[in-house]
Amino acid sequence: MSAGKAPGKLPTVEFAPLGRTKEVKEGVTIIAAANRADVPIGQSCGGDGICGWCRVKVLHGMENLSAPTSLERQLMTACAFAPDERAACLAKVGGDITVTTGYW
Ligand code: FES
């Protein structure tokens, strides 16, 4: 999960096209990174993996995210996620990534 990250460097989450980035510790969810960067992100279930509103498109670094859990796989199927989309409340950052949404 740490591919794409130099030793000792914290993973960086870039929110495109907002031009905002946030360094986070490994294992932090995308939604937590967004909250820390003051980037608005949809959510209605509070991160329980139910609503799918936190869907983000991963533009770069999909390989640097945690593998989807069974809960996230279930959500991705139920909400018809595209292959390049992940649930921000469930996907954990392990290296540099760039994400976007249709409302940024
Ligand atoms: S916030 Fe509801 S599924 Fe992520």
Image: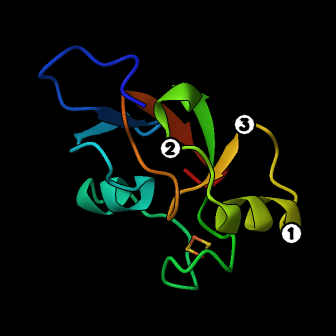
Element on which disc 3 rests:
loop
Ligand 1 shows up in the quarter that is bottom right
Q: Is residue 9 visible?
A: yes
> Compared with residue 29, is residue 2 higher up or lower down, i.e. above or below?
above
Which residue position is annotated with label 1?
78
> Compared with residue 82, is residue 41 higher up or lower down, i.e. above or below?
below
Determine the image quadrant of residue 26.
Answer: top left
Determine the image quadrant of residue 43.
Answer: bottom right
> Compared with residue 5, is residue 79 higher up or lower down, i.e. above or below?
below
Q: CA distance from mark 1 to mark 3?
A: 16 Å
Asked if the residue at tag 2 contacts the one at tag 1, i.e. Cβ–Cβ closer than 8 Å, the answer is: no
Which residue position is annotated with label 3?
84
Residue that appears at 39% across and 34% down = 14
Estimate how packed mark 3 is, as few (under 14), some (14 to 19) or many (20 or more) residues with alpha carbons within 10 Å: few
Q: Is residue 60 visible?
A: no
Which residue position is annotated with label 2?
66
Element on which disc 1 rests:
helix
Q: Position of residue 44 (x, y in %)?
A: 58, 84
Mark closest to the chain's N terminus, 2 or 3: 2
Mark closest to the chain's N terminus, 1 or 3: 1
User: Residue most toward the left?
Assistant: 8
